[in-house]
Image (cartoon, rainbow, N blue to C red):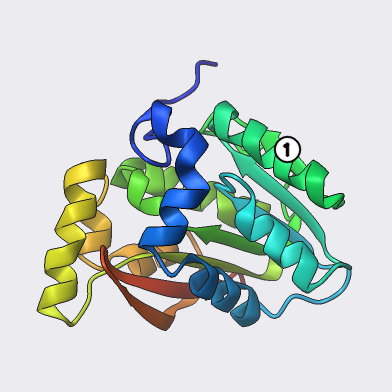
């Protein structure tokens, strides 16, 4: 099976080595990811998936926050996974990393208690969002939860205007569902229940929202 096309984390491949630096100076990355971890209520022996882990910043933060979890990071971008591997080796942490083809997740049904994802879904066209969410639902245990931090529709006209910067970079088609505030609905349509916005962050690129839903 051929790999699906995807938008690199910073649109252009040559920017990948500078990913951590550029995100760090343009976004409240640490605050967003720490809030995502706090809201997910990780406990020892919890099985966790970081979907679209990128350079594993969130994955590492989650493991350091709760060393007793079993966490796996997955990403379609092989170049950025290589960078993630280097960071994890330097930290000497027990974290699994895996790549995949962008379609079927290489895990059994009900493999994870918690699934985290940060600033990934605005890169995906709506049809791909739906397929990935369906896969995430499949690999979530009954009673497990999905936590997504990503751009959403803000009540602030300024934040909506600022989001156009990202839309111009990543494309208006992939970011359409985010701009319309449809992420909770898409999560509900694949089977997740009680999808709701738990926290909001105003950024220079638009409003980032943490959305939580449960598999019941």
Q: Secondary structure at mark 1?
A: helix
Q: Nearer the viewer, residue 138 or 38?
A: 38
Q: Nearer the viewer, residue 103 or 138?
A: 103
| Count of all numbered marks drawn on residues in the image | 1
Q: The N terminus appears in which quarter of the rendering?
A: top right
Q: Write down the quadrant of residue 68 in the picture.
A: bottom right
Image side of residue 102 versus residue 108, left or right: left
Residue displayed at 76% across by 73% down: 65
Residue 137 appearing in the image: yes
Residue displayed at 39% across by 48% down: 129
- In this rendering, the answer to whether 150 lies above or below 81 is below
Q: Give neighbour class at mark 1: few <14, some 14-19, many 20+ (Cα, 10 Å).
A: few
The image shows residue 70 at horizontal and vertical percentages of 83, 58
- In this rendering, the answer to whether 3 lies above or below 199 is above
Q: Write down the quadrant of residue 182 in the picture.
A: bottom left
Extreme residue toward the top, this view: 2
Residue 120 appearing in the image: no
Q: The C terminus appears in which quarter of the rendering?
A: bottom right
Q: Nearer the viewer, residue 8 or 15?
A: 15
To which residue does mark 1 refer? 86
- In this rendering, the answer to whether 11 lies above or below 94 is above
Image side of residue 19 versus residue 79, left or right: left
The image shows residue 44 at horizontal and vertical percentages of 87, 73
Residue displayed at 54% across by 58% down: 117
Q: Write down the quadrant of residue 13 in the picture.
A: top left
Residue displayed at 41% across by 27% down: 14
Q: Nearer the viewer, residue 157 or 143?
A: 157
The image shows residue 112 at horizontal and vertical percentages of 73, 58
- In this rendering, the answer to whether 64 lies above or below 13 is below
The image shows residue 171 at horizontal and vertical percentages of 21, 41
């Amino acid at each position: 099976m051929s790999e699906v096309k995807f938008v690199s984390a910073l649109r252009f491949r040559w920017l990948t080595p500078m990913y951590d630096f550029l995100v760090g100076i343009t976004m409240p990355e640490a605050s967003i990811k720490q809030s995502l971890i706090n809201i997910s209520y990780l406990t020892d022996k919890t099985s966790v998936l970081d979907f679209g882990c990128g350079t594993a910043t969130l994955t590492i933060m989650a493991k350091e926050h709760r060393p007793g979890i079993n966490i796996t990071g997955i990403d379609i971008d092989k170049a950025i996974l290589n960078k993630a591997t280097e960071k994890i080796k330097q930290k000497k942490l027990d974290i699994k990393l895996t790549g995949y083809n962008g379609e079927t997740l290489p895990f059994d049904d009900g493999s994870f208690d918690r699934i985290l994802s940060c600033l990934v879904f605005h890169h995906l066209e709506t049809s791909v969002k739906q397929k990935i969410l369906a896969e995430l639902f499949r690999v979530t245990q009954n009673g497990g939860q999905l936590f997504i931090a990503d751009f959403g529709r803000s009540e602030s006209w300024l934040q909506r205007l600022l989001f156009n910067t990202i839309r111009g970079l990543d494309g208006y088609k992939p970011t359409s569902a985010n701009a319309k505030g449809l992420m909770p609905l898409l999560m509900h349509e694949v089977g997740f229940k009680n999808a709701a916005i738990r926290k909001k962050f105003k950024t220079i690129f638009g409003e980032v929202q943490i959305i939580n839903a449960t598999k019941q």
